[in-house]
Amino acid sequence: MKRFIHLVTFLAMSSVFSQNIIPLDTIHWTVKAQSYVAETFKGKEAVYIQGGGIILKNEKFLNGTIEFDIFLKEEQAFPGVEFRARGAHSEQFFLRPHLSGKADANQAAPKVNGITPFQLNFGPKYSFPYTYKYNDWTHVKVVVNNDKAQVFMDYADTPNLSWYLTHDPVEGDIVIRGGRFSGMHLADIKVTKEASTLIHFNPIEREPIPGLIPEWEISDMFEENLLDSPKNINALVKKRTWQGKLKIEEGAAANISRLQLLYNGEPGNTVFAKLIIQSDKDQLKLFEFGYSDRVVAILNGEPIYRGTNKWRSRDYRYLGTIGLFDAIYLNLKEGKNELLMAVSEDFGGWLITGKFQNTNGVILK
């Protein structure tokens, strides 16, 4: 079902729009959705969007405000807005209407090389509980000013959430997303491009995990199934090229998608994250770590651990968020030791982190 009313029709209805509402027509918007239709819905001129979104044409956005109305359904979906979108990168705020009232009823997060790392950007720093209505329009307003943003729900006087943006302030596209399986209606989209004054900007800070490995060296990508045969691991390692060192973010983990584009059309969803450990003697050291989505740990060429931490891998509400939830004892030899964490990703955050309980007798490189 694809039916979009063109500009001439909307001009005849101009009385229903205030001056700065952007007409819902193909002159102003590019539609990328499974299906869509423009229609009068619940008293508003609206567009129904299923499985996709609409992109504002011929306009780039840096600072200002983005507002829209959405008629929510109580189903799993992630409607919302992307702004400063440039290829595989953007800033985002989206709703989870199936999680009304819960702590993760919504999400502020970047898109980094095509991945939205909600398993890294989580908790009250990036989400807030909100009770949604399913019998009336919900109003969303996002205010953006340089490296900061705020969201106001249903004409609130004070922000529901304030947060620091991830990417450098560079102008890009605006994308408004609708529903997923059965679609949702959008209406009354407004955009201003003046730098806006923020109100009560008091973002929540998250305590960093102390003592983490500060950076990891990351390899090129390869196919995960190449790890299935342990006898091939040394040859697999020798074939790798190294892309550089990656520092941890959010005081929690290194975001591998900073260096690697997962959805690049080539086979491969796995990299090695490397740590060189110089030990002053033969010793056994406890190493705590976290990862997403899957990992194989390899010490001095020998696989010693395999695990899964992806979304819903442990129960139906498990998010796969990053943390020091696993540990292994590393049998270190005197001298140089190489720890490789082969990290594979599906979606939600391509992440690696770790720490030693104590670093006595070891130097990390």
Image: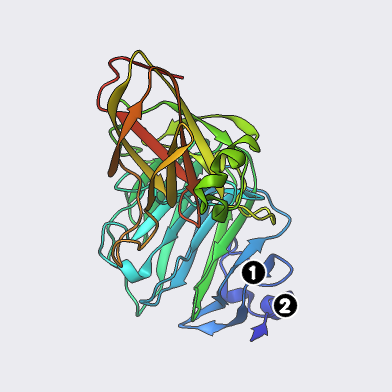
Tell me, for residue 116, which label it has, or none. none
Q: Is residue 318 visible?
A: yes
User: Neighbour class for label 2 at 10 Å: few (<14), some, many (≥20)?
Assistant: some
Vertical comparison of 326 with 332: above or below: below
Q: Amino acid at mark 1?
A: Pro
Task: Classify mark 1: helix, strand or loop.
Answer: loop
Find the distance from the CA under tag 1 to the CA under tag 2: 9 Å
Residue 115 x %, y %? 53, 52
Residue designated by label 1? 23
Looking at this view, is 354 or 26 the one in front? 354
Residue at 32 percent of width and 73 percent of height:
133
Side of 124 relative to 169 (left or right): left
Looking at this view, is 116 or 199 the one in front? 116
Side of 46 relative to 121 (left or right): right
Residue that extends furthest to the front in the rendered view of this protein: 231
**Whether label 1 touches label 2, CB < 8 Å:** no
Q: Amino acid at mark 2?
A: His
Looking at this view, is 358 or 284 the one in front? 284
Residue at 57 percent of width and 52 percent of height:
226
Residue designated by label 2? 6
Residue at 34 percent of width and 71 percent of height:
98
The image quarter containing residue 141 is bottom left
Residue 51 x %, y %? 56, 73
